[in-house]
Image (tube, rainbow, N blue to C red):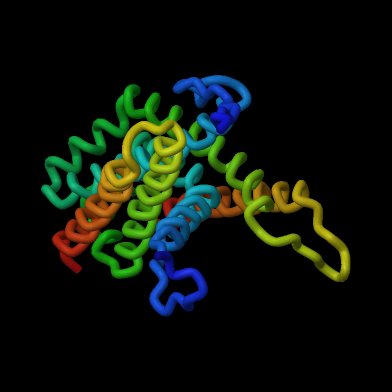
């Protein structure tokens, strides 16, 4: 006997909008600033192109990451990039029928959640 | 009683590797590039936490040709993400009507690309300015 005709007072809520929001936020941040970030951290900062040699040395980077705003920027970039990739990989693997969705969720969302916690812990561990 | 035999269209397991779905697959894989770059930054944070010597080793790796090659590949994936992200964006939002006129999706895509270019260029310009002043 189904509940047809009855009002669902407690419908099953989906968590999908939360993951979709994180995917969208990561997609937008990476679309707007991703190319500049890669050019900076992969090219200009380590090779010193147009920048002082000590610009990204231990002391300066530590100072940036100890700043509360710096912490927020680092957390937003790293975590959102992971959540963006996780959503894309999850949906693609689901469409490829690579495995049961619960396992795919753990392998994608689970990894993103774990790495978010690791990032958060490191940001607290480097001090203020 | 007749047996129901609905037509099932055959879908090979590797459908995603062939046109017209290949474009979709490549677009989704750009997300892997975005996440891998996040991993590159997280590796730097781990090295920073472990101390000056480890962080210097990380910086030496970043200055190596291998790292440069990796970052060129990541940049290509990121740029494809930028292109496709703003191609998809107008399709995911309601029709935009300004002053009674419908803004075509093409214009929204172009506006997104321009905005992305401005944001990235401004970020690099800011870092260069801070570097010049420090």
The mark tally for this picture is: 0
Check the image and name the residue furthest to the front.
B1
B93 displayed left or right of B97: left
Check the image and name the residue furthest to the right.
B100
Q: Name the residue: 39% across, 54% down.
A: A80
Q: Is residue A113 above or below residue B62?
A: below
Q: Name the residue: 41% across, 47% down.
A: A87
Rendering coords of residue B40 (x, y %): 31, 40
Q: Is residue B79 above or below residue B91?
A: above
One can see residue B121 in this view? yes
One can see residue A49 in this view? no
Q: Name the residue: 45% across, 22% down.
A: B13
The foreground one among B18 and A8 is A8
Q: Is residue A99 above or below residue B109?
A: above
The foreground one among A2 and A47 is A2
The foreground one among A16 and A7 is A7
Q: Image quadrant for the N terminus of chain B?
A: top right
A125 displayed left or right of A92: left
Residue A118 found in image quarter = bottom left
Q: Image quadrant for the C terminus of chain B?
A: bottom left
Q: Is residue B17 above or below residue B34?
A: above
Rendering coords of residue A9 (x, y %): 42, 79
Q: Name the residue: 63% across, 46% down.
A: B88
Rendering coords of residue A120 (x, y %): 23, 60
B33 displayed left or right of A113: right
Residue B102 found in image quarter = bottom right
Rendering coords of residue B52 (x, y %): 14, 46
């Amino acid at each position: 006997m189904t509940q047809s005709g009855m009002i669902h007072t407690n419908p099953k809520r989906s968590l999908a909008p939360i993951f979709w929001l994180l995917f969208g936020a990561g997609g937008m941040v990476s679309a707007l600033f991703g190319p500049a970030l890669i050019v900076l951290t992969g090219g200009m900062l380590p090779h010193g192109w147009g920048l002082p040699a000590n610009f990204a040395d231990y002391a300066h980077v530590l100072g940036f990451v100890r700043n509360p705003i710096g912490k927020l920027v680092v957390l937003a970039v790293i975590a959102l990039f992971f959540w963006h990739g996780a959503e894309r990989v999850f949906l693609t693997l689901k469409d490829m029928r690579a495995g049961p969705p619960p396992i795919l969720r753990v392998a994608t969302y689970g990894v993103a959640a774990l790495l978010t916690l690791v990032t958060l812990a490191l940001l607290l561990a480097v001090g203020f | 009683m007749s047996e129901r035999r609905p037509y099932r269209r055959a879908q090979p397991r590797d459908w995603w590797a062939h046109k017209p779905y290949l474009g979709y697959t490549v677009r989704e894989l750009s997300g892997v590039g975005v996440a891998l770059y996040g991993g590159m930054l997280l590796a730097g944070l781990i090295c920073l936490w472990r101390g000056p010597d480890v962080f210097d080793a990380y910086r030496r790796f970043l200055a190596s040709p291998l790292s440069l090659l990796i970052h060129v590949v990541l940049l290509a994936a990121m740029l494809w993400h930028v292109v496709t992200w703003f191609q998809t964006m107008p399709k995911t939002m309601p029709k935009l009507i300004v002053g009674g006129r419908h803004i075509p999706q093409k214009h929204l895509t172009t506006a997104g690309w321009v905005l992305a270019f401005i944001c990235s260029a401004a970020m690099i310009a800011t870092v260069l300015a801070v570097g010049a002043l420090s």
